[in-house]
């Protein structure tokens, strides 16, 4: 149970930071920096408890890579999705009256952006947090947080920069993305996670 609580807490503060920062009208470097930093510190806080996935796509990648028991997959994803919804509700309470403007729903561009940067995120996670060659490093949280920061800068205006189905659900609840393309975010993010697992296993055949 502790693992699932840790996943809830980490995902909650990630999505809450996204919601409150964007709703506060942050522009330029502030939202990506705040979001990447929130993910980084939550990873350092919860990594020793749950592995600090905070993302169903990462959970899928870690499972396919062979470092997450099958029995933990759905509970992890469930805790993450519930945390995303809870964080959206709290953000709405903290910043009432906010009127959201959803990113344009260009299906092809959203799909490509989300697949690529979710791939990048999950690929980094697998290499810095699960590889035997980087075991015990102290930079894993920084590397993962900066991957999200980079993605937010690069394609945040195209797809909303979710790279995470739990974030996408929270973002849809807040109006940052439209409900009609939520399925696209979820599928694209899971596909990116699966592709990252394939890439990791292909490039590291001796790391079982």
Image: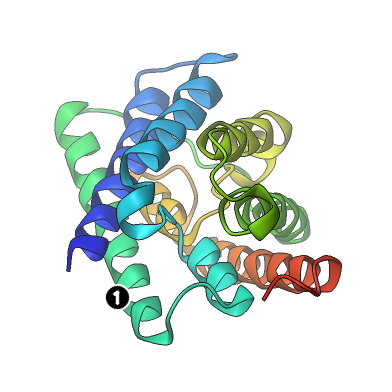
Picture quarter with the N terminus: bottom left
Residue at x 49% of width, y 49% of height: 177
> Left or right of 14: which side holds 132?
right
Q: Position of residue 111 (x, y in %)?
A: 71, 60
Which one is in front, 187 or 55? 55
The number of numbered badges drawn on the structure is 1
Residue at x 57% of width, y 42% of height: 160
Q: Position of residue 183 (x, y in %)?
A: 53, 70
Q: How is the image coloured?
A: rainbow
Q: Position of residue 188 (x, y in %)?
A: 65, 66
Residue at x 40% of width, y 52% of height: 52
Picture quarter with the C terminus: bottom right
Which one is in front, 188 or 126? 126
Quadrant of the rendered structure where residue 97 is?
top left
The residue that disc 1 covers is: 75
Quadrant of the rendered structure where residue 130 is?
bottom right
Q: Position of residue 167 (x, y in %)?
A: 43, 51
Q: Where 29 falls versus 203 (above or below)?
A: above
Residue 123 appears in the rendering: no
> Left or right of 42: which side holds 118?
right
Residue at x 78% of width, y 73% of height: 206
> Left or right of 66: which side holds 166?
left
Residue furthest right as drawn: 203
Q: Dot 1: what SS?
A: helix
> Left or right of 84: which side holds 206?
right
Residue 67 appears in the rendering: yes
Q: Callout 1: few (<14), some (14-19), or many (20+) C-alpha neighbours within 10 Å? A: some
């Amino acid at each position: 149970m502790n693992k699932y609580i840790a996943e809830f807490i980490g995902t909650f503060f990630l999505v809450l930071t996204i919601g409150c920062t964007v709703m506060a009208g942050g522009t330029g470097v502030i939202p990506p920096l705040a979001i990447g930093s929130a993910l980084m510190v939550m990873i350092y806080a919860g990594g020793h408890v749950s592995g600090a996935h905070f993302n169903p796509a990462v959970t899928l990648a870690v499972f396919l890579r062979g470092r997450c028991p099958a029995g933990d997959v759905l509970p992890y994803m469930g805790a993450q999705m519930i945390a995303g919804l809870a964080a959206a509700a709290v953000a709405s309470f903290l910043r009432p009256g906010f009127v959201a403007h959803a990113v344009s729903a260009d299906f092809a561009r959203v799909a490509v952006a989300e697949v690529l940067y979710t791939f990048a995120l999950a690929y980094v996670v697998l290499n810095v947090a699960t590889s035997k060659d980087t075991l015990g490093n102290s930079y894993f949280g920084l590397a993962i947080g900066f991957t999200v920061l980079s993605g937010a800068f690069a394609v945040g205006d195209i797809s909303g920069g979710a790279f995470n189905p739990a974030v996408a659900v929270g973002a849809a609840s807040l109006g940052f993305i439209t409900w009609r393309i939520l399925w696209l975010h979820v599928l694209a993010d899971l596909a990116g996670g699966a592709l990252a697992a394939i890439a990791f296993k292909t490039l590291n055949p001796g790391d079982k």
